[in-house]
Image (cartoon, rainbow, N blue to C red):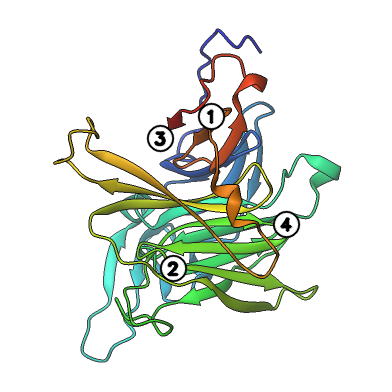
Amino acid sequence: LDVDKAYSVTFPAGTFVTCCGASDGWLVVVDELCNLSLHNFFTSRTIPLPPVTDFPRVEAEHDDQGKIERYRLKSLYRHSPDVTYDAHHLATFFYQKAVLSGNPSRGGGGDYIVTVVHYGGEWISYARSGDARWRVLVSNHYWGQDRHNGSGRIYAECAYHNGSIYAVTYKGGVERWDLDAAGMPSWKAVLLYCPRDAVLTRHLVAAPGGGLWQVSAVWEPARAAVPDGIRFTFRVVDDDDGVDAGERGSMQEHALFLGLNRSACLLAKNFPGVRPGVLYF
């Protein structure tokens, strides 16, 4: 491909409503029925993921021809009604972020995991390559109640790092799940929450030294030193893997990429046109 040329990407009708993740040339896309699939826009290969109706509390409603028309999200509470959404409408907001643990193109398909933050950031689920069902890691039944530290437990992002699944909440708490050979998760609170007003979002980024950073976008419009009103803060995610806290150091040779893509910290000199010491958001 010519790096100086823009290329158009098209999808078959009904297969793309929005994108909730990107990694190694693969997009995690949502179709008009609110189902997820992996799409490689270099090869046009598509890998379907388990359907949205496999998630707890999601039931499909059909029209007279048997086609899915809408979805009912079943309430957990006796006095709260179920909520019904048009399928296309639900597809626009049901998934917040999806990440891949590896490249599906390697090793004839390989062993990879897709992890998604969904249900308004209150749930995290995952599926291994070839799985027909989603497996739920977190299901926060009580809105805004955190069973671990009493704060709102809404997740901003998930990441796959050193063989484990990590997630960060909007309050700054970081959690880790280790999966055994049978896919059974064991949970650990890695970093306690750190309350801060006006946090727009948080990201987890693999650091140059092999550790993990939490990068937060903070809204500070009154500070003259922050012309666009957004300041980014860094915090080392410290756990029992022996990560050196001194890794916090210099970003002068690297560039950060944050967003719906897999968050990344790259050595700028290896990528023509990428500026060192710059955060792309």
* Residue 34 visible to an observer of this rendering: no
Q: Which residue is mark 2?
A: 173
* Residue appearing at x 22%, y 30% in the figure: 227
Q: Which residue is mark 4?
A: 129
Q: Which residue reaches farthest bottom?
A: 78
- Observer-side mark, 4 or 1, equals 1
In front: label 1 or label 3: 1
Q: Earlier in the sequence, mark 4 or mark 1?
A: 4
Mark nearer the viewer, 3 or 2: 2
Q: Quadrant of residue 170?
A: bottom left
In this picture, residue 143 sits left or right of residue 11: left
Name the residue tied to disc 3: 281
Residue 270 spot, x, y in % from top left: 67, 21
143 or 228: nearer the viewer: 228
> Picture quarter containing residue 74?
bottom left
The residue at the point 27 percent across, 40 percent down is 230
- The answer for how far apart the CA atoms under marks 2 and 1 are is 27 Å
Tag 1 residue: 252
Comparing 82 with 258, the one in front is 258
x and y percent of residue 222 in the render? Answer: 13, 41
Q: Are marks 3 and 4 in contact (CB under 8 Å)?
A: no
* Amino acid identity at mark 3: Phe
Quarter of the rendering occupied by the N terminus: top right
Query: First in sequence: mark 3 or mark 2?
Result: 2
Disc 1 crowd, CA 10 A, few/some/many (<14, 14-19, 20+): few
